[in-house]
Every structure is written in structure tokens, then in C-alpha cells.
Image (cartoon, grey):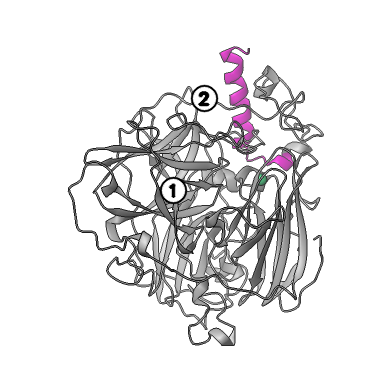
């Protein structure tokens, strides 16, 4: 085993490379990566050079080293701080300078493409948010952490948006020149998975510089609004979205920037999902509607500072588990129903959450899942657990009146995962997993005007599509040239891989050709439905749904369909294991008035 001095020196050397802003491609050029794409097994660089390798067959570790092992954080206590309830972002009366359709380059706007739907959907509310450095406490047992966050906090504030109410969000880049170890201060903000024109989507190559701003126009409009059959409702109500999130999407640097804090939630309401539990679907509202963003992170064992290992190429697993920016908080709840909006922000870990009663580990504590990703399910589904790959979301309703007053319940991830490649497939026994937080049923009884989800028979129907006339494409997600590829290619801002004809239907086959890894695949812009997994209908009830991330498990071939309507321009599809995404499992494509039928783009 290595001695601590050598490990510390290696860590220092690696941090210097990261602080220098070197991307993986730079390291290739400098000869610091092997032909297989792993960091050279040179003493002083790779922790695996000392035998931290945790095995693996096709390149994830092995003799040429490079994976980086899993560092160990300093000890922290659990459940000593309350869950942070995220603030709601407030609009401003006006923006100065006033937003313009064409990029306001003279005033310092980094946008390069005119808004395509500004006149049709004029913004009714204006927001300004600043990407800036901040200092926050993630645990009383760690020093203050230097983060990059929206308005200087992480997670950032929550947007409350409504269908039929277009908004404009001005992102102001005030990030510092010195990244303090990792992060890239040129940024682009993606609203995942808004029905958003390309120039406002947060396209990975449309990043701006410190000192610039970028206006994002969010029409908050239902997909299908250009279809005459939905003109009365300004789009197809079945395409309604609820829980979205926003995060940095800078090409090659998303993992560093999101890990550093650039992430938040964006909620959409309408006349059914009203945000008021006495109306519409009567979902728990107000203080009983709680955004929760999950992350796992590593902290330097000497300094206690947030640690990002650029050389861990399988994907980074943290050994500290955070909800809304705090390590293992507690949350005091009343004995009634709560709507919890869960988002797995990664960077690489898959989770499967159970409600664990520490005094009765054998109890099956069920709850309702009501949404998958940003989409309400056709109706609530009773579940014992919820699995989330990176970027997947689930809205759940937990009825805490089922538990005894004073009782504590853990939110436990029981999915076993030993490295960034993906979970092993084992579900650990209750109590043997990792607790992300603790619910304490200690608040007094209060009124509950929400509807029991057991009695809700329908939210929205699933849109149906004629699949007889579709464009078929196949995408292989694979390892190649030491990184991750889609159909044998890396992400490249200069290349448009294929063009979808606007308003057409596409049927895609996603194939996991990378033995040993799992990939949560995200396709921007419109929701898909899963036709089949390895030829059979998706086994989970909650996958009979609209989705924007599809889990691509070991050896799987998954068929999905969707339409691409209403707007034009460039979008990405990519793995949402943020490390895979950056290295460089992403394909850039576009929606045009004419398209191609390339079956293997
Ligand atoms: Cu992946």
C-alpha cells in the first residue's frame, strides 16, 4: 500500500492539472493518458499506480491504471442539521438593459442566436440570476465550502413557473477567474427538460464568459402548440410537465460545474397541477410540497474541502450523501401527506430509495410515485422504492400519518454500487445501505386538504402516436479510444450528426455496447415513451410514462419513440453520468424544416 505522503503528493499534482483547466483532451495531447485513455501509471499522478485499482475488465482499471480509486472523506455526523428548504426565485420589475430578440452583444450578452419565439410568447415575468462563487456549510464537521452556485447558493433557488406565462431569465456570469481547483467559468444553463427553443435550452456549445450575460426565453408552452388539433389548448395537455431542473451544461466541463454547485429546480404548474391542494389534482402544496436535490460528494481528507477527481473516468462516487446541499439532514414533518420532488443530480451514482424504519427493518413502507422525470404518471403508482439514475426525477407522495408520532424514518439508498460504472444489481438489506436523510414525525397534526393518491384515478393520458411512418435510428453507447462514444464518435461542437424533420416521429434504438457500464441517456427537448427493453414491454409500471432520461442497463437494447415539434435548432443527446458525458458520450443534432433519415448517425 502507498504511504500517505505519496498519496498526498499525487493528489496535489492531480489537483494542479485540474486547476490548470486541462480537459481530458489536453491530457491526451500532453501524453498523460495512455492509448487506452487512462491516466499514465506514473507515480505522482495516478492513485491506481499504487494499487488502488479496484479491478474491472475492459479498461476501467487494470494494469495501466487511471481510474483513481475512491477517496475517503473526513468523518461527519449524521442528522445534526435540518433539511434546507429552498427559496423561491422572485421576478424583477424590469431588466436593464431590456431584453432583445437579437443578441445584445454590445451590452455584453453572450447569446449568438436570435430568440425564435419571443414575439409569439412575449415574456410576462423577468428574472435575473447570477452564477457566482459562494461559501456554504455542508456539515458542521467540515469547513465552509467554496462553491459556484446560482445566486451564490447550491442548490440554487426554485423557479415557480406556470403554463401560459412565458418568462425570461437573464443568467449573469460573475464567476471568478480562479477556479480554486476545478470548474470552468464559461457556462451555459440547461433547463432540463423544458420545451424550450434551442437558443434558450442551454446547448452545451453556447456558453458565455465571465462578465457576460445570457437571456433564456422560456415560453412555458405545451408541446404540440403548432398542431392545429391542439390550437384551442395551446398545445397538448398530455404533454404537461411538472418537476424540471436547471444545471450547467458546458461542453466537457458539466461534471465539474454541477459538482461545484450549479444546479437547481424549476417547477411548472397549470390548471390541474395548481400548486394549491384545494384545487385541481389536489396535490400537497405550500410547505408540504418540497423540492429535494440529491448529490454524493467527496471531501479532501486533509483540508475537508470539496474534492473533484478529474482522473476518475468511470464516474465519481461520493462517500457523503447530501440533500439540498447538506450532508444527511433531518426533516421534521407533520403526520399528513407530503409531495416530495426528488432529483438525482449525480455526478455518477444510481440510487434506489426505500423508507426504512430503524426499529422495524422488515417493514415494507410503501408510498406513491406520482411522476417520472418531469411527467405526472397516468395515475399514482404504489411503490416500495424508487430508482433514479443521474438526472432522473420522481415526485412522490408520502403519508407520514401512517407512522407513529415521534417516529423516525430513514430515506435509504439500498442500491449497491462500488464504482462509477453503474450499480452491481444487488439491492442491499434494509439498514445496510446509505441514509441520505431522516424524517422525524414530530410536528403537530395539521389539516390535510390534499387528495389521497389511492383515490386518484387519472392525471393525464399518455399521448399516442402512429408508429407506421417513422424515422428509425440506432445509437450504440460504447467505449472507444479510451473514452465513451455514441456510434463510434465523440461529442464535437463543430459537427451536426443528424437532422430531425420538425413535427416528425422518430423511433430510436439505444444499445448499450459498453460491457460493464450503465448509462442514463438523456435526449433534450421532447419526452419519449419506452416501447421495449430487450424486445419486451418495460417491466416497471412507472416506466409506462413519458420520460426524458432512459436507463440503459447492462447489455440492454431499448426502443423509444417521440416527436420533435414546434421549435428549430441544435440540441444534444448524451449520457447523464456527468463524467461519461464530458468524456465525451454526447451527440449533437438538430431539428430542421427538412431532415435526414440516417439510421446510424
Ligand atoms: Cu454513461
Q: Nearer the viewer, residue 106 or 370?
A: 370
Residue 46 in the image: x percent, y percent? 67, 25
Residue 208 in the image: x percent, y percent? 58, 58
Residue 18 magenta: yes
| SS label for mark 2 | loop
Residue 589 in the image: x percent, y percent? 72, 64
Where, quadrant-wise, is the C terminus in this rendering?
bottom right
Residue picked out by circle 2:
72
- Quadrant of residue 47 within the rendered picture: top right
Q: Main secondary structure of the magenta part?
A: helix
| SS label for mark 1 | strand
Q: Is residue 151 visible?
A: no
Q: Which mark is residue 293?
A: 1
Tell me what residue is drawn at x 53 percent, y 47 percent. 388
Say if 327 sits above or below 111 in the image: above
Question: Tag 2: Cα neighbours inside 10 Å, few (<14), some, or many (≥20)?
Answer: few
Instruction: Look at the numbered disc 1 and say if its residue's Cβ is closer than 8 Å to ligand 1.
Output: no
Q: Nearer the viewer, residue 388 or 493?
A: 388
Say if 415 sits above or below 552 in the image: above
Q: Which residues are magenta?
A: 1-26
Q: Horizontally, is 277 left or right of 183 in the view?
A: left
Amino acid at each position: 500500500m502507498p504511504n500517505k505522503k505519496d498519496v498526498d503528493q499525487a493528489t496535489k499534482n492531480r489537483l494542479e492539472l485540474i486547476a490548470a483547466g486541462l480537459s481530458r483532451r489536453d491530457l491526451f495531447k500532453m501524453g498523460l493518458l495512455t492509448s487506452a485513455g487512462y491516466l499514465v501509471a506514473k507515480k505522482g499522478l495516478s492513485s491506481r499506480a499504487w494499487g488502488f485499482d479496484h479491478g474491472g475488465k475492459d479498461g476501467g482499471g487494470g494494469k495501466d491504471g487511471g481510474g483513481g480509486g475512491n477517496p475517503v472523506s473526513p468523518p461527519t455526523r449524521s442528522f445534526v442539521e435540518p433539511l434546507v428548504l429552498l427559496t423561491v426565485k422572485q421576478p424583477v420589475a424590469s431588466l436593464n438593459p431590456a431584453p432583445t430578440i437579437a443578441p445584445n452583444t454590445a451590452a455584453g450578452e453572450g447569446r449568438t442566436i436570435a430568440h425564435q419565439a419571443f414575439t409569439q410568447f412575449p415574456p410576462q415575468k423577468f428574472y435575473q440570476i447570477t452564477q457566482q462563487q459562494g461559501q456554504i456549510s455542508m456539515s458542521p464537521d467540515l469547513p465552509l465550502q467554496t462553491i459556484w452556485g446560482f445566486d451564490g447558493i447550491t442548490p440554487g433557488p426554485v423557479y415557480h413557473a406556470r403554463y401560459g406565462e412565458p418568462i425570461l431569465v437573464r443568467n449573469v456570469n460573475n464567476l471568478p477567474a480562479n477556479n480554486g481547483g476545478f470548474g470552468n467559468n464559461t457556462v451555459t444553463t440547461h433547463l432540463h427538460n423544458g420545451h424550450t427553443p434551442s437558443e434558450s435550452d442551454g446547448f452545451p456549445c453556447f456558453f458565455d464568459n465571465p462578465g457576460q450575460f445570457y437571456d433564456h426565453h422560456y415560453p412555458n408552452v405545451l408541446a404540440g402548440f403548432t398542431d392545429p388539433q391542439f390550437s384551442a389548448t395551446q398545445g397538448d395537455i398530455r404533454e404537461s410537465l411538472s418537476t424540471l431542473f436547471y444545471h450547467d451544461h458546458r461542453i466537457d466541463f458539466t461534471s465539474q460545474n454541477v459538482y461545484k454547485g450549479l444546479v437547481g429546480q424549476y417547477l411548472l404548474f397549470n390548471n390541474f397541477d395548481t400548486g394549491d391542494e384545494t384545487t385541481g389534482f389536489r396535490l400537497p402544496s405550500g410547505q408540504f410540497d418540497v423540492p429535494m436535490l440529491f448529490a454524493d460528494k467527496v471531501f479532501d481528507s486533509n483540508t475537508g474541502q470539496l474534492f473533484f477527481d478529474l482522473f476518475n473516468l468511470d464516474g465519481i462516487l461520493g462517500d457523503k450523501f447530501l440533500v439540498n446541499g447538506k450532508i444527511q439532514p433531518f426533516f421534521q414533518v407533520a403526520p399528513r401527506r407530503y409531495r416530495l420532488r426528488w432529483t438525482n443530480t449525480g455526478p455518477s451514482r444510481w440510487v434506489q430509495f426505500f423508507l426504512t424504519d430503524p426499529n422495524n427493518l422488515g417493514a415494507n413502507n410503501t408510498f406513491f410515485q406520482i411522476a417520472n422525470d418531469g411527467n405526472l404518471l397516468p395515475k399514482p403508482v404504489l411503490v416500495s422504492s424508487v430508482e433514479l439514475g443521474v438526472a432522473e426525477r420522481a415526485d412522490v407522495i408520502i403519508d407520514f400519518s401512517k407512522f407513529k408520532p415521534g417516529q423516525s424514518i430513514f430515506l435509504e439508498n439500498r442500491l449497491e454500487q462500488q464504482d462509477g460504472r453503474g450499480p452491481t444489481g444487488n439491492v442491499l438489506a434494509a439498514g445496510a445501505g446509505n441514509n441520505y436523510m431522516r424524517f422525524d414525525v414530530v410536528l403537530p397534526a395539521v389539516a390535510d386538504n390534499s387528495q389521497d393518491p389511492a383515490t386518484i384515478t387519472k392525471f393525464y393520458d399518455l399521448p399516442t402516436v402512429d408508429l407506421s411512418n417513422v424515422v428509425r435510428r440506432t445509437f450504440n453507447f460504447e467505449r472507444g479510444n479510451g473514452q465513451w462514444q455514441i456510434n463510434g464518435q465523440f461529442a464535437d461542437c463543430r459537427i451536426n450528426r443528424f437532422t430531425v424533420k420538425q413535427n416528425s416521429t422518430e423511433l430510436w434504438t439505444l444499445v448499450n455496447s459498453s460491457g460493464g457500464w450503465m448509462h442514463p441517456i438523456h435526449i433534450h427537448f421532447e419526452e419519449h415513451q419506452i416501447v421495449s427493453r430487450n424486445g419486451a414491454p418495460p417491466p416497471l409500471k412507472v416506466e409506462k410514462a413519458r420520460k426524458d432520461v432512459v436507463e440503459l442497463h447492462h447489455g440492454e437494447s431499448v426502443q423509444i419513440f417521440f416527436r420533435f415539434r414546434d421549435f428549430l435548432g441544435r440540441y444534444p443527446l448524451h449520457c447523464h453520468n456527468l463524467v461519461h458525458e464530458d468524456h465525451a458520450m454526447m451527440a449533437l443534432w438538430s431539428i430542421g424544416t427538412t431532415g435526414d433519415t440516417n439510421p446510424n448517425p
